[in-house]
Image: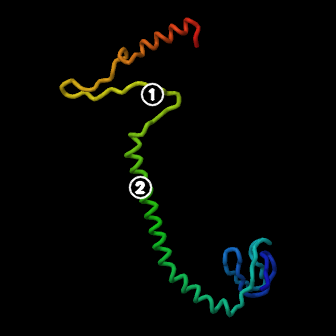
Amino acid sequence: MKEYRGGTLVEKGVYLNKANGELTQQYGKVRVLPGDKDVKYFKIPGILAIIGGPFVGLAFVMFLPFIGITGLIGFLAYKAWHGMTAVGRKIFQPVAIRQEPGMAYLTQRGGKVREDGEGEKAPKADDTGIDELAKEVTKRRQQGEK
């Protein structure tokens, strides 16, 4: 079959775009194929276009419900996935560790206190040994250590 390029002057007939399968019907006084030189076409015989049209329509009618069902299932799966991730973020994000650059996170959190006043309590600063550590650091800096 002879190959035609976009923008060329052609004779009357039906032409098929090789890139996207689009049919272009050329008739009238000026018959120029659309597109630039990179677009390739070839001429379809008129009888083949007339006979093939109903079969292409039949294929379209047969596969249209399949395409619709597939699209619906894909859409529902997309929505379900994003719904589950949103719920997961709401559940797990509050318990996730949130770290900020430059923060040490060395302090202890206070424990729960029962109604009778007893229970786990956060240790005081004296109980953790931080004061002794600060004194040791100050003493070593005075001696010239870094």
Dot 2 amino acid type: Gly
Q: Nearer the viewer, residue 101 or 126?
A: 126
For label 1, count other residues whose C-alpha is less than 10 Å away and answer few (under 14), some (14-19) or many (20+): few
Residue at figure coordinates x 73%, y 87% from the top left: 13
Which of pointers 2 and 1 lies earlier in the amino acid sequence? 2
Q: Residue at the location (27% across, 26% down)? A: 120
Q: Give x and y (percent) for residue 27.
A: 73, 86
Work out how far the residue at label 2 is from the one at label 1, CA to CA, in angstroms.
33 Å
Vertical order, 87 against 108 (above or below):
below
**Depth check: 60 or 80 in front?**
80
Judging by the rendered image, the residue that carries numbered circle 2 is 83
- Say the numbered circle drawn on residue 105: 1
Furthest residue toward left: 116
The total of numbered circles placed on residues is 2
Q: Quadrant of the N terminus?
A: bottom right
Q: Is residue 79 left or right of residue 31?
A: left
Where residue 41 sits in the image (x, y, percent)? Answer: 75, 79
Mark 1 residue element: loop
Q: Residues within 10 Å of mark 2 (few under 14, many from 20)?
A: few
- In this view, the mark in front (2 or 1): 1
Left or right, 41 with reference to 116: right
> Which residue is rendered at x = 76% and y = 78% of the image?
33
Give above or below for 59 relative to 135.
below
Residue 121, horizontal then vertical, whole percent: 29, 24
Measured as percent of width and height from the top left, residue 16 is found at 70, 81
Where disc 2 sits, the SS reads helix
Q: Residue at x 67, y 78 (%)?
A: 22
Q: Quadrant of residue 69?
A: bottom left
In the depicted view, which residue is nearer to us: 36 or 96? 96
Q: Nearer the viewer, residue 85 or 48?
A: 85
Quadrant housing residue 111: top left
- Disc 1 marks a residue whose amino acid type is Tyr
